[in-house]
Image (cartoon, grey):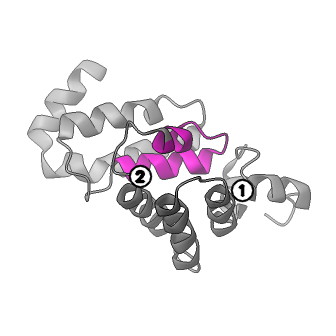
Amino acid sequence: MSDIPADTLARLSGGEWESANLMEWLATDMSELARTVASGMPRAPLRDSLCGAAEEMRGKGVTVRLQLIGGAIAQAVPDLASLEFEFLARHRSDLVRQWACYAANNSGLPLTLDRRLRETKRFAADPNMSVREAAWMAFRPHLALNLDVGIRLLEPLS
């Protein structure tokens, strides 16, 4: 990670670029990225949730950080059809798109397994491998809770 140029890290953590490999992904400062994204949010609930998550995620493992910020987004923007959620789901940064995926799969949102799968499919088809991986990681716990239904839902996709 120490070989990643400072300019690349700044652009990754500033949400200008998506990561090209695992080292860039791991080196991206998610707290800084969350604050940067928050600064562009017009509404206070999402802006405040992103800033709160930025502080709370420091020192946490990668999966915990993704779950934490996904939960913060889901709480602030429970409407997955909203412009704010769409902005995150289509963001240039692969990490921000992963946050949106974790938000769509947050257990605090009362979604059926079918609806959750429909929301997750867009992330599973993302051009960036890390977003596709996040789709599986975020959806998997819901699948495990209702495997019989989940297999029937996934069968046409396979």
Please state if 22 lies on the left or on the right of 55 as rendered. Answer: right
Give the farthest residue toward the left: 148
Q: Earlier in the sequence, mark 2 or mark 1?
A: 1
Res 112 → quadrant: top left
Q: Which residue is mark 1?
A: 23
Image quadrant in which the N terminus is located = bottom right
x, y (%) of residue 75?
Answer: 36, 60
Residue at 30% x, 48% y is 140
State which region is magenta. Answer: 84-104
Front-lying residue, 36 or 99: 36
Magenta region includes residue 78: no
Res 62 seen here = no
Front-lying residue, 150 or 75: 75
Above or below — where is 31 with respect to 142?
below
Residue at 44% x, 30% y is 122
Res 123 seen here = yes
Q: What secondary structure is the stretch in magenta mostly built from?
A: helix
Please state if 115 lies on the left or on the right of 55 as rendered. Answer: left
Above or below — where is 147 with respect to 72?
above
Q: Which residue is mark 2?
A: 102
Residue kind at label 1, given as amino acid type: Met
Residue at 66% x, 45% y is 93
Q: Secondary structure at mark 1?
A: helix
Residue kind at label 2, given as amino acid type: Tyr
Above or below — where is 48 with respect to 16?
below
Give the farthest residue toward the front: 43
Residue at 44% x, 67% y is 68
Magenta region includes residue 102: yes
Mark 1 neighbour density, 10 Å: few (under 14) some (14–19) many (20 or more): few
x, y (%) of residue 157?
Answer: 30, 22
Image quadrant in which the C terminus is located = top left
Front-lying residue, 93 or 42: 42
